[in-house]
Image (cartoon, grey):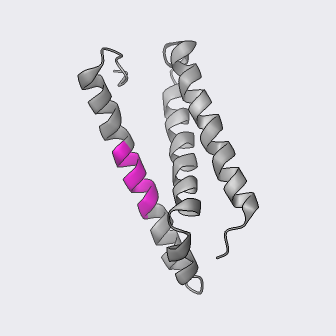
Amino acid sequence: MHINSGARVTAWVLAAVMLLANVAGYVFDLYQRFWWFDRVLHACTLFAMTFWAAVFLCSKVLAAGASYWWIRLLVIASIGIAVGAVWEVAEWGFDQVMPANVIKE
């Protein structure tokens, strides 16, 4: 699996769009206005972060398993699960140190 410059640009664009969407969610109170916003944003942000990590951090691992599609799938799925877990821990930690109520209940 060869990572070309188009994949790198796409990874950065997705990361920037998701960063802006997360900030907009707080600035415009979209989490409170739309019940589904948090769920959609979690899924899209997790996808963008997983794609970015796969392109920039794991390209050698993915290239090494190029002949085995299931290795690539397993690596990318593992990255996604790990990123999602770190994201949730970061939200919880932020709620512990800042009165921002990041975790909406």
Above or below 105: residue 85: below
Relative to 56, 85 lies left or right: left
**Closer to the camera, 33 or 97?**
97
Residue at image position (57%, 54%) is 52
Residue at image position (34%, 18%) is 101
**Closer to the camera, 67 or 53?**
53
Which residue extends farthest left?
Answer: 96
Above or below 33: residue 19: below
Residue 65 visible at all: no
Which residue extends farthest bottom?
Answer: 67
**Closer to the camera, 19 or 104?**
19
Residue 89 visible at all: yes
In magenta, the rendered stretch is: 78-86
Relative to 12, 61 lies left or right: left
The total of numbered circles placed on residues is 0
Residue at image position (70%, 51%) is 10
Instruction: Give the x, y percent position of residue 39.
Output: 49, 33
Quarter-of-image position of residue 22? top right
Residue 30 lies in the magenta-colored region? no
Instruction: Give the x, y percent position of residue 92.
Output: 29, 31
Instruction: Give the x, y percent position of residue 102.
Output: 37, 23
Instruction: Give the x, y percent position of residue 80.
Output: 46, 55
Above or below 28: residue 43: below
Above or below 16: residue 20: above
Quarter-of-image position of residue 78? bottom left
Residue 85 lies in the magenta-colored region? yes
- Specify the principal SS of the magenta part: helix
Q: Quadrant of the C terminus?
A: top left
Residue at image position (58%, 78%) is 63
Q: Quadrant of the N terminus?
A: bottom right
